[in-house]
Amino acid sequence: MAHKISASSNKRLAKNTILLYMRTVVVMIISIFTSRVILQSLGIDDYGTYHVIGGFVAMFSMLGGTLVTATQRFINVELGKKEDGNPNEVFCTAMGIHIALAAVLLLALETFGLWFLNCKMNIPEGRMFAANVVFQCSILAFLLNIICMPYNAIIIAYERMKAFAYISLYDVIVKLLISYALFMFLYDRLIIYAVLLLVLAISERSIYSIYCRKNFPEESKFRIVRDKQAYIRQTSFAGYTFLGSFAAILSNHGVNIVLNLFCGVAVNAAHAISMQVFHAVSKFVNDFTVALNPQIVKTYAAGELDKSMELVYRGAKFSYYLMFLFSVPIIFLTPEILKLWLGHYPEYTIIFVRLTLIYGLVTVLSKTLTTQILATGIMRTNAFIIGGLRILILPLSYLVLWLGYEAYMVYYVMIVIDGISIFTRLFILKSITGVRIMGYVKNVLLPVMFVSIPSVVSCYIVWKLMPSTMLYDALFIFASLGVCTMLIATIGMSLAERQMAMSGLRKIARKVN
């Protein structure tokens, strides 16, 4: 029976991951074209202005992401209880909390946020009116996103990844159409762009809501929950994850604002491009972990700690490998890729892209560790220690720029802090569950190190020997993928993992044929 359950879980994980990867490939290709067109239609300064303002609002929206994580966790726990579970109560409680949160954040954005935009941020002369319109459109889109987030939690908890695939395709296709439509307008394109993205956000959130009401009518039926303990349970859990999310806000969007204060919107444009490359590459990892996370939580809730930790180890290792495969050729060929992709790009973009991908390789190693800590429900230690560490990124970045160092030094700060956070999470998880730290070192850190070092050295030698032409660049990409894949298969995977991977590839090949 246990074997059947395990086989069923693996099959579902593989199916969900494949669906998400198919979506990711299409989304990434369309996004590449969209970014080029948007940069051409808006220009570097307006492009940077939109992203720094949108990032400022996104700082607040990540607070809602804290509650989504809590909601998803509680729904997974209720699903693990089978007939005794009540996921609808979790959904309704979360909806009430999100509505209250949206009201509080609206007040904060329309007071402090409005003052900060008009009095502190470095906006080009003559663009303050457009910046305020972008700000208001971003707020409306953000509020809608906050209120509708519990629908996302239901879809993820039930592992309906096909819905995410289709809605993501809708999102990128409409954004591509918007980018081309901007050339038709003679009026301020930055304002038109913000308004059209708001319309897209409204339609997208409506689709999520309709999908849940149609496919999960009982679970997503909203009613007022009068049980105060239900609110306390979710807000208490989310409260401990709040510090971690707040720290993530500072390390991502807060650093962008610091760059704006010292360097201006052109550097914000470079940062936005580097983050777009990072998000395009990390989508493959995120899709894998989104498909994996519910199983980590469910196996832990069922008392299967060993199986849960096995998922954590494999999830961390394979997440790194996926990120590594795509990052290596991009890091070596950054100037060529940017020239082909964007044509003209801001200063600092090359070094920003390279350091952002290295930062991503460090952070991806702790994604499943965080999920396992969330699964335990014991959040206080993780929230205060990891949150405290990551909050240091903002003042240290500010200090580095204030001392006159180059803008890219803030990425070194982020890399070092997140590297320390990996080992900190290991000690926290050991104190909660008793798992051995050496288990993670042996099963994750050593394999990725033994793969990374020879891969980078081999690719560097090939890169230095090859001339810089489009043909040789294409050959280098295939060569780097081949070298990295071979080393991952021979050094980075156990025999059982190789057999599992080959079995999965054969199944995919049979379905394709």
Image (spheres, rainbow, N blue to C red):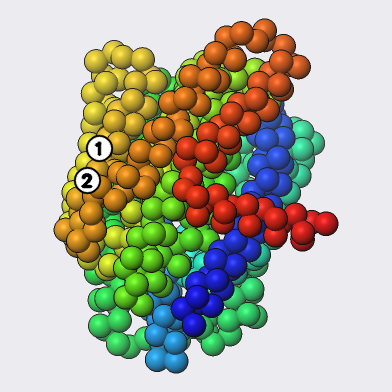
Q: Quadrant of residue 391?
A: top left
Name, please, the residue furthest toward the front: 495
Q: Which mark is residue 424?
A: 2
Q: Quadrant of residue 377?
A: bottom left
| Secondary structure state at the residue bearing disc 1 | helix
Say if mark 2 contacts mark 1, CB within 8 Å: yes
Q: Is residue 452 visible?
A: yes
The quarter of the picture where the C terminus appears is bottom right
Residue at image x 36%, y 77%?
302
Foreground pick, 280 / 7: 7
Q: Which mark is residue 319?
A: none
Judge left or right: residue 75 versus residue 414. Answer: right
Q: Which residue is mark 1?
A: 420
Judge left or right: residue 383 versus residue 351. Answer: left
Where residue 42 appears, x then y in whole percent? 65, 29
Gap between marks 2 and 1, in whole Å? Answer: 6 Å
Could you tell me the amino acid type at mark 1? Ile
Foreground pick, 429 / 106: 429
Residue at image x 71%, y 22%?
474
Judge left or right: residue 345 versus residue 181. Answer: left
Could you tell me the amino acid type at mark 2? Thr
Q: Residues within 10 Å of mark 2 (few under 14, many from 20)?
A: some
Name, please, the residue furthest toward the right: 513
Residue at image x 65%, y 17%?
336
| Secondary structure state at the residue bearing disc 2 | helix
Q: Quadrant of residue 236?
A: bottom left
Foreground pick, 499 / 417: 499
